[in-house]
């Protein structure tokens, strides 16, 4: 395998991974807009406006790089700089992809026509990325997610100092959070083994009237957070 083949392989990795990152970004944006009322842009502070612009430019650059790697790479790096978060490693990933597009462009600068990649290498790159994309799409969009565990595994009574949950085998949930009763709540699996490996989301999600609980099953406990209105409370529930 020559340096040219490695460069061609890296070129397609940056393009495909960039496309996947754009898909994830758009999916999370749409999910946020559907689940929550979008904040008014006019209410943004100067710092928030710059961060939002940087985030948009960062991921827009990945899309542009598919057709114009030079400008796409420069846009992604510029967006990352606007975010001012060099130590925030998730944002380093799209920025690194943008830089990778520039590196590939430099490595292929002497070619007027970019050579084609060997078929075996193309399959070796596209196949795992396709599987990763399918599993990721299922994780984000699946209702319920493919191969997710059953919520029956945590049926029973769980409690700590502030919260008491009674989870039925049918997925119904009752109990209390502080002095308030949990009304009309149900529990559902919220991620698969794939999401657990990547540390996406939580094992279980409980939805009720004006309350949501995000819980992970860890060492015989249910740990996570309760969202009630604008209040967010950490919980560590023991079986009782």
Image (spheres, helix red, strand yellow):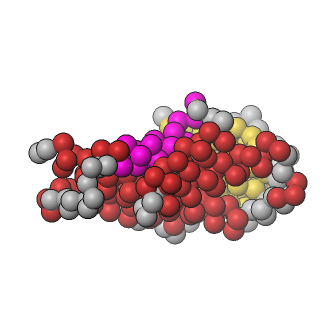
Q: Is residue 95 magenta?
A: yes
Q: Could you say which is closer to the camera, residue 94 or residue 57?
A: 57
User: In the rendering, at what x and y percent does residue 224 appear?
Assistant: 62, 41
Side of 127 relative to 162 (left or right): left
User: In the rendering, at what x and y percent does residue 168 appear?
Assistant: 59, 59
User: In the rendering, at what x and y percent does residue 53 appear?
Assistant: 70, 52
Q: Could you say which is closer to the camera, residue 1 or residue 201?
A: 1
Q: Could you say which is closer to the camera, residue 94 or residue 232?
A: 94
- Residue ranking furthest to the right: 43
- Residue ranking furthest to the top: 87
Q: Is residue 12 visible?
A: yes
* Magenta segment main secondary structure: helix
Side of 131 relative to 4 (left or right): right
User: In the rendering, at what x and y percent does residue 37 appear?
Assistant: 79, 64
Q: Residue, x 27% and y 49% (percent of image)? A: 110
Q: Residue, x 77% and y 62% (percent of image)? A: 38
Residue 119 figure quarter: bottom left
Side of 8 relative to 193 (left or right): left
Q: Is residue 167 visible?
A: no
Q: Which residues are magenta?
A: 87-105
Q: Is residue 8 magenta?
A: no
Q: Residue, x 63% and y 35% (percent of image)? A: 85
Can you say which quadrant of the picture contains the C terminus? Answer: top right
Side of 81 relative to 137 (left or right): right
- Residue ranking furthest to the left: 1
Can you say which quadrant of the picture contains the N terminus? Answer: top left
Q: Residue, x 63% and y 55% (percent of image)? A: 56
């Amino acid at each position: 395998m020559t340096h040219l083949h490695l460069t061609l392989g890296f070129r397609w990795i940056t393009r495909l991974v960039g496309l996947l990152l754009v898909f994830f970004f758009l999916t999370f944006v749409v999910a946020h807009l559907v689940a929550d009322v979008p904040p008014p842009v006019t209410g943004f502070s100067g710092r928030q406006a710059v961060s939002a612009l940087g985030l948009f430019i960062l991921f827009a650059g990945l899309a542009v790089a598919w057709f114009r790697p030079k400008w796409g790479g420069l846009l992604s790096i510029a967006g990352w700089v606007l975010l001012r978060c060099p130590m925030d490693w998730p944002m380093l990933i799209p920025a690194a992809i943008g830089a990778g597009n520039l590196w590939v462009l430099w490595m292929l600068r002497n070619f007027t026509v970019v050579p084609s990649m060997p078929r075996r290498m193309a399959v070796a790159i596209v196949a795992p990325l396709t599987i990763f994309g399918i599993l990721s799409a299922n994780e984000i969009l699946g209702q319920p997610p493919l191969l997710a565990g059953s919520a029956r595994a945590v049926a029973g009574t769980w409690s700590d100092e502030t919260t008491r949950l009674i989870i039925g085998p049918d997925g119904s949930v009752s109990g209390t959070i502080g002095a308030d009763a949990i009304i009309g709540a149900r529990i559902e699996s919220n991620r698969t083994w794939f999401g657990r490996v990547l540390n996406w989301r939580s094992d279980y999600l409980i939805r009720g009237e004006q309350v949501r609980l995000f819980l992970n099953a860890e060492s015989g406990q249910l740990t996570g957070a309760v969202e009630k209105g604008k209040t967010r409370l950490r919980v560590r529930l023991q079986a009782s």
